[in-house]
């Protein structure tokens, strides 16, 4: 069976504006100042090393995601955020909550972003750093938050804006995410992590299929052999925004 990869490169992972505060043992640091080797907080509550930093120019929509006690971040539309969504304020008030990854463009005011619970008091300092008012963030967090077994949840407000400037993303060892002052967001390079012989990260923060053909619409294509199928299937399955497809050449049918 002849198979090809199709990569929707224009929609490869989103990014964050330069001043976005990233949480680490250092406290809170703008993403533009994070370096390879820095430790950052991840969804599991552990600090993991940064293995890659990416930046590129972005013109277009951006979403202002605000957590009242923790300040705002600006995030591009495809970038996924770990949230809990509830139909009513009382729904599922006891754990376990249903956590889901949702692209910024699909977030709704009233969704809850998440923070590792073990670090909640530490995160209060991050909130103070990101708030110009320097208010009593820990008490605000306690007042507004709900808790699952492992995470603190805080409600958000989301507003669409336009943006022109540099945006950034991080690659994290052993983990698919990292913690900002406004909750946990997805990192990327997942494809290059699971299939490094077939995928590589580009300096613009997006990935490339190694040895591909680039189409006029900026998608990438490459025929693969049977021996290359499993690694690329894993890459496609690891992609948080489903922009990697394996396609049967004879029929055009998408396997994924
Ligand atoms: S897994 Fe690869 S293709 Fe998918 S969003 Fe991440 S970097 Fe892009």
Image: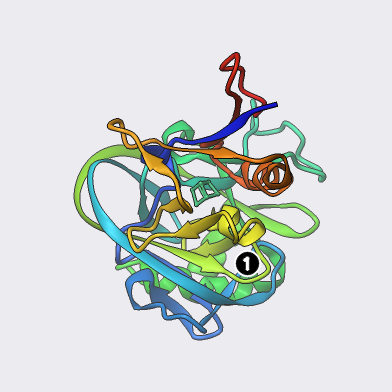
Q: Nearer the viewer, residue 196 or 193?
A: 196
Of the pair 126 and 35, the residue shown nearer to us: 35
Which residue is outermost to the top?
Answer: 251
Q: 210 left or right of 144?
A: left
The vertical placement of 90 against 43, above or below, is above
Left or right: 140 as drawn, with respect to 101: left
**In the image shown, does 189 or 124 lie closer to the viewer?**
189
In the image, is residue 209 above or below residue 117?
A: above
Question: 223 or 141: which is nearer to us?
Answer: 223
Q: Which residue is mark 1?
A: 42
Instruction: Give the quadrant of the N terminus.
Output: top right
Q: Position of residue 115 (x, y in %)?
A: 62, 60
In x, y percent, where is residue 236? 62, 41
Could you tell me which residue is drawn at 49 percent across and 67 percent down?
137
**Residue 155 visible:** no
Q: Residue at x 65, y 29 (%)?
A: 256
CB at disc 1 and ligand 1 closer than 8 Å = no
Q: How is the image coloured?
A: rainbow
Q: Relative to 256, does residue 111 appear above or below in the rendering?
A: below
Quadrant of the image occupied by residue 220: top left
**Which residue is depicted at the point 56% across and 60% down?**
141
- Residue 208 picture location, percent across and down: 44, 51
Q: Secondary structure at mark 1?
A: loop
**Residue 1 in view here:** yes
């Amino acid at each position: 069976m002849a198979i090809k990869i199709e990569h929707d490169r224009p929609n490869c992972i989103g990014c964050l504006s330069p001043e976005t505060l990233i949480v680490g043992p250092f406290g809170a640091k703008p993403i533009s100042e994070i370096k390879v080797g820095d430790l950052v907080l991840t969804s599991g509550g552990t600090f993991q090393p940064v293995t890659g930093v990416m930046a590129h120019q972005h013109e277009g929509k951006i979403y202002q995601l605000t957590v009242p006690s923790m300040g705002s971040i600006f995030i591009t539309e495809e970038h996924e955020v770990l949230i809990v969504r509830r139909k009513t304020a009382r729904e599922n008030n006891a754990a376990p909550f249903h956590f889901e990854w949702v692209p910024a463009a699909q977030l709704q005011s009233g969704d809850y972003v998440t923070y590792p619970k073990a670090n909640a008091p530490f995160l209060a300092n991050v909130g103070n750093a990101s708030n110009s008012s320097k208010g009593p963030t820990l008490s605000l967090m306690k007042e507004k938050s709900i808790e699952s077994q492992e995470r603190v949840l805080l409600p958000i407000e989301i507003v669409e804006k336009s943006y022109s400037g540099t945006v950034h993303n991080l690659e994290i060892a052993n983990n698919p995410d990292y913690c900002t002052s406004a909750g946990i967001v997805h990192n990327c390079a997942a494809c290059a992590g699971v299939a490094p012989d077939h995928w590589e990260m580009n300096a613009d923060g997006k990935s490339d299929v190694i040895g591909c053909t680039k189409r006029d619409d900026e998608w990438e294509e490459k025929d693969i052999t049977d021996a290359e199928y499993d690694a690329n299937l894993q890459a496609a399955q690891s992609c948080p925004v489903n922009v990697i497809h394996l396609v049967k050449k004879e029929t055009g049918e998408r396997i994924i």
